[in-house]
Structure formats: structure tokens, C-alpha cells
């Protein structure tokens, strides 16, 4: 089977925009020492790229892309649409999600856009289009990374109206819908499409994991998966107007239940995912997740993120034992990965992920055990060359 890349991509998320320009050259030297050959950039840069509704500024991203191109790196170029700029929420408050309790959110956090907001869709498509027009012809742009870790739900009026349209397409008649949901129970029969309301805490929900009517709640999650998928395909198609060939992906999350990954995989050129097992996760469970990612398209996949050392957001965030990162990486390669990528290449200096693992820790030097292990693996992968790319995995067991 032919792979998507010419070599094993070895690198990960890189955010030079968080650091002074003089740090970048030092980063390049350290990355070369570790045999890092790729970088995922521009994941959360919408506010930098579009500082106001009328203004775009690509000067800094030009510098980053030029620098990585000179280094002969493979660039995984993200579209930055996973986190809204402040001006958008200020000017158009309805772009922010409404949560399960019915609260309209303000500016903050990430994955914070209503997937059915016409305003969000307008500006996200425009940004993806401008990025593809500007960088799509660069031969070092090896993969497009749309948004980031899609997930979550919105319960706003835009979604409620779109849900009714989705239901009409699925059921055709109210009689069929009432029968499917067993709406005779508690006398909840609806006689007009506009009588259907979202199944949140203000209606049929009984906490986020329970519901009075399973039919509407399951359908709403399927609708949300389709709505968010429409965001992905919108950006994908915007990129394709300028770049006809470069693979386009978005990073999935293993066995995350919020999206129908089998349906999503049909729209992706290559599957990618983020692997963050806990300190006590059985290796067999990680293997299952890798096999699932492989099985979505029956093709090699990308490991878009793993930590070289420790997570910072789980209940217990233990440092990986000596050799564990290397073993986990080879497990991933053996189960079909064509890339080994980290979050992150240089550790953030502030905010909630400042203690998440990185190739370059806060010490800023190569003199750490974690860096030496990253370098060892990079040297070994460089020797492997393209021998494992596009490899076929013969499954002995199938799980339904």
C-alpha cells in the first residue's frame, strides 16, 4: 500500500509565535540534533492571522513557514479555526456555544464555536481559503490539519432550527418520528416540527449522561456529529480550491464517542489521532485504539500527538518511565502509523498547558533525559527511512 509521505514524519506541535524571534534559531538547532524533520504549526493562531474583522496579517506565519522550509522540514499546516478570536465573539455573540444547561458562553476556552453559526462558517471558510491560496503551492506543506480535536455540543437556537431540518430529512413525517421516539410516553407527541426542542437540561435531559427520551438524545448527538463534520468538509473544500493534492486531515481522539468516526473517515484523506493514555492504561487498550484508527480507512494513519514525557490534565500525571515513550512509539508504528508526532516541541511558558510535556522543557536545553530519548528515537527512525511507510497490517481478529 502506498503511503502519503516520503519519510516518517517526526516532530509535532510547534508554537514559535509564543516566543521571541531569537529563540527560533536555537529551536532549529536543537530539533536538528534530535533528528526532528516536521512541525505542526498555526493550530491556534486565528487571532494573530486576523486581528480584526477586516484585516489579515500573515507576516509572522510567512516567517515561520519560510524558516521551516529552509530547514527542509515537512510542514503540517493547521487552519487555526479551533479557537475564536475575541473580536468575533464581541461583534457576533451568537457564534459562541450554548451549553447543556442553556447558558450562552462568552469569549474564552477553545472548541467554542457553534457549528451551525453562519458567522463562524463564513469566517472559518474564508481563513482556510486564504491559507490555502497563500501556502498551498509550497512543496514543504506536506499535510493540512483542519481545526483541532473536534468535539463537544451546542444547544443554541441556530442548532435547534438546523436539528429540525435534519430530522425532516431523516424521518420524512412526524408520524414516523413520534413512533421512533415513542412519544406517546408521557404524552409527548408533537404535531408540528417547530414543537421539537433540543434535549438539554431545560427539556428532556437528566444530567449530561441520561435522558427521558433516548431517541431524541441519540439523534441529537448524531446531528451534532454531522454538523461538526460539515465544518470539516467546508474547510477541506476551501483548501481544495487552491491545493488539489496535499492530504487533508483533522486529529481524532481514539475511542471518543461524540463523533461518528467511521462516517468522518470517509471525508478525510488520512486519519490522524492524539494518543494520551493514563499512567495505568493497559497497553492492550492503546493497541485497540491504534487498530481502530487504522481500521477507519483500512490504511496507515498519523499519530498527530503524544507526549514525550507527561500529560498535565489527567487526574495523575506521571512522567513516563525510561524507554516507555520509545516503546509506545514503536507500538504505534507497528499498528500502522506513518508519523510520530508530539505535543509539544517547546513547552509553553504560561496558561493551562505550561506543564504538559515537551521535547524542549522549560530548562531550554538538550540536557534532559526526555530530550535524550527523543534524540535516540529520532536517530533510529531516520535509519528506518521509508521502510515502514504504507505497510499493510493483516488483522487476525475483528471486533464488531
Image (cartoon, helix red, strand yellow):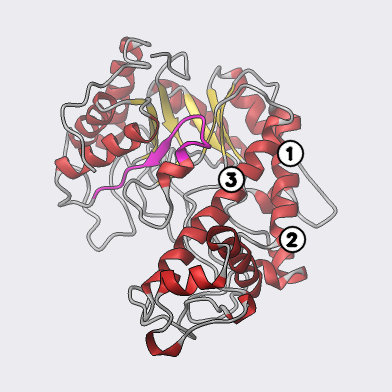
Q: Residues within 10 Å of mark 3 (few under 14, many from 20)?
A: many
Determine which of the numbered discs, if any, sits on residue 129 in the image: 1
**In the displayed image of the protein, which residue is found farthest to the right?**
54
Give the secondary structure at mark 3.
Answer: helix
Residue located 45% across and 38% down the image: 265
Residue 263 inside the magenta-drawn segment: no
Q: Callout 1: helix, strand or loop? A: helix
Q: Which residue is mark 3?
A: 232
Indicate which disc, 2 or 1, sits on the residue closer to the N terminus. Answer: 2
**Residue that mark 2 sits on:** 119
Q: Which residues are magenta?
A: 265-277
At horizontal 38% and vertical 47% (from top left) the residue drawn is 253
Residue 74 in percent (x, y) is at: 53, 23
| Distance in Å between CA atoms under marks 2 and 3 | 15 Å
- 286 or 43, nearer to the observer: 286
Numbered disc total: 3
Amino acid at each position: 500500500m502506498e503511503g502519503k509521505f516520503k519519510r516518517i514524519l517526526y516532530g509535532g506541535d510547534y508554537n514559535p509565535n509564543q516566543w521571541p524571534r531569537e529563540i527560533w534559531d536555537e529551536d532549529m538547532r536543537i530539533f536538528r540534533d534530535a533528528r526532528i524533520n516536521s512541525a505542526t504549526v498555526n493550530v491556534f493562531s486565528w487571532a494573530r492571522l486576523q486581528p480584526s474583522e477586516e484585516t489579515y496579517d500573515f507576516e509572522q506565519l510567512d516567517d515561520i513557514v519560510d524558516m521551516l522550509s529552509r530547514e527542509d522540514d515537512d510542514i503540517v499546516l493547521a487552519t487555526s479555526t479551533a479557537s475564536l478570536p475575541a473580536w468575533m465573539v464581541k461583534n457576533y455573540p451568537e457564534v459562541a456555544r450554548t451549553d447543556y444547561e442553556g447558558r450562552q458562553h462568552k469569549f474564552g476556552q477553545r472548541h467554542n464555536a457553534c457549528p451551525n453559526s453562519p458567522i463562524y462558517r463564513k469566517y472559518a471558510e474564508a481563513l482556510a481559503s486564504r491559507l490555502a491560496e497563500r501556502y498551498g503551492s509550497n512543496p514543504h506543506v506536506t499535510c493540512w490539519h483542519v481545526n483541532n480535536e473536534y468535539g463537544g455540543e451546542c444547544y443554541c437556537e441556530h442548532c435547534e432550527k438546523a436539528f429540525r431540518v435534519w430530522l425532516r430529512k431523516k424521518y420524512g413525517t412526524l408520524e414516523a418520528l413520534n413512533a421512533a421516539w415513542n412519544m406517546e410516553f408521557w404524552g409527548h407527541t408533537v404535531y408540528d416540527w417547530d414543537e421539537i426542542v433540543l434535549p438539554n437540561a431545560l427539556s428532556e435531559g437528566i444530567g449530561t449522561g441520561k435522558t427521558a427520551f433516548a431517541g431524541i438524545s441519540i439523534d441529537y448527538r448524531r446531528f451534532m456529529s454531522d454538523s461538526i463534520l460539515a465544518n470539516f468538509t467546508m474547510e477541506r473544500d476551501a483548501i481544495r480550491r487552491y491545493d488539489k493534492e496535499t492530504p487533508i486531515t483533522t486529529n481524532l481522539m481514539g475511542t471518543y464517542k461524540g463523533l461518528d468516526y467511521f462516517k468522518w473517515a470517509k471525508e478525510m484523506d488520512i486519519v490522524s489521532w492524539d494518543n494520551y493514555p493514563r499512567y495505568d492504561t493497559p497497553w492492550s487498550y492503546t493497541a485497540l485504539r491504534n487498530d481502530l484508527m487504522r481500521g477507519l480507512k483500512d490504511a496507515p494513519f498519523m499519530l498527530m500527538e503524544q507526549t514525550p514525557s507527561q500529560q498535565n490534565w489527567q487526574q495523575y500525571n506521571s512522567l513516563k518511565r525510561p524507554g516507555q515513550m520509545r516503546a509506545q512509539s514503536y507500538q504505534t508504528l507497528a499498528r500502522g502509523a506513518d508519523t510520530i508526532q508530539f505535543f509539544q516541541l517547546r513547552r509553553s511558558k504560561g496558561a493551562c498547558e505550561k506543564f504538559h510535556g515537551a521535547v524542549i522543557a522549560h530548562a531550554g536545553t538538550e540536557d534532559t533525559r526526555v530530550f535524550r530519548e527523543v534524540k535516540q528515537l529520532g536517530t533510529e527512525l531516520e535509519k528506518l527511512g521509508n521502510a515502514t511507510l504504507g505497510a499493510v497490517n493483516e488483522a487476525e481478529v475483528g471486533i464488531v
